[in-house]
Image (cartoon, rainbow, N blue to C red):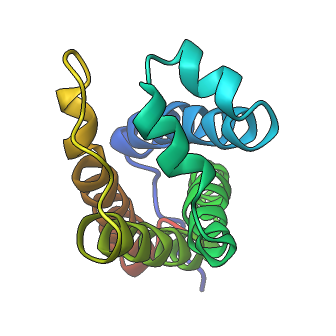
Amino acid sequence: MSMTVKTPWHLWVVGVISLLWNGFGAFDFIQTTTRGEAYLRESGFDQAMIEYFMAMPNWMYGPWILGVWGALIGSILLLLRNKLAVWAFAASALGALISLIYGKMIDPPPPPTAGMEMMAWMPFVIMAVAAFLLWYAWTMAKKGVLR
């Protein structure tokens, strides 16, 4: 006999907030990669930071793509109550971790200019959100909420 697990209310809250957060990440990815300097300038980046992003090695697009699109797909799968959300969020967390290590240890960006100090903390915020979403999806899968 099959037992149906009721979807907890918080899944919808986490799923919608996750979709909005990761949707913005996807928008930012598209704008940064297609409009480049123009988008970064409009976002308030100074010339040194724009040059840093423009000089990013090609191999770093892999972790960035994994992080951004894994998170967006994970958000959609979470709302669909699909257990593949765990794998999508795991890929996203891996991409975020590689990006964090690269940006903080291998090739740190220039110091932020006035008004952009918060940007120095964004890789840590992104990693924390990615870890939370992975944990949340794993917990929901373990409880049988995700099928």
Name the outermost residue toward the right.
34
Q: Residue at x 24, y 57 (%)?
A: 128
Q: Residue at x 35, y 69 (%)?
A: 107
Depth check: 10 or 45 in front?
45
Q: Quadrant of the N terminus?
A: bottom right
Residue 17 in view in this figure = no
Q: Is residue 100 above or below residue 114?
A: below
Q: Quadrant of the C terminus?
A: bottom right
Left/right placement of residue 105 relative to residue 67 reads: left
Locate residue 43, reporting x and y percent: 50, 18
Locate residue 103, reporting x and y percent: 34, 64
Q: Is residue 73 above or below residue 88?
A: above
Depth check: 14 or 121 in front?
121
Depth check: 120 or 109 in front?
109
Left/right placement of residue 58 relative to residue 68 reads: right
Residue 73 in view in this figure = yes
Left/right placement of residue 13 relative to residue 129 reads: right
Q: Residue at x 57, y 13 (%)?
A: 42
Using the rendered view, name the quadrant where residue 91 is placed: bottom right
Q: Residue at x 39, y 75 (%)?
A: 138
Q: Is residue 75 above or below residue 145?
A: above
Q: Is residue 38 above or below residue 22?
A: above
Locate residue 73, reporting x and y percent: 68, 57
Using the rendered view, name the quadrant where residue 136 is placed: bottom left
Locate residue 37, reporting x and y percent: 66, 30
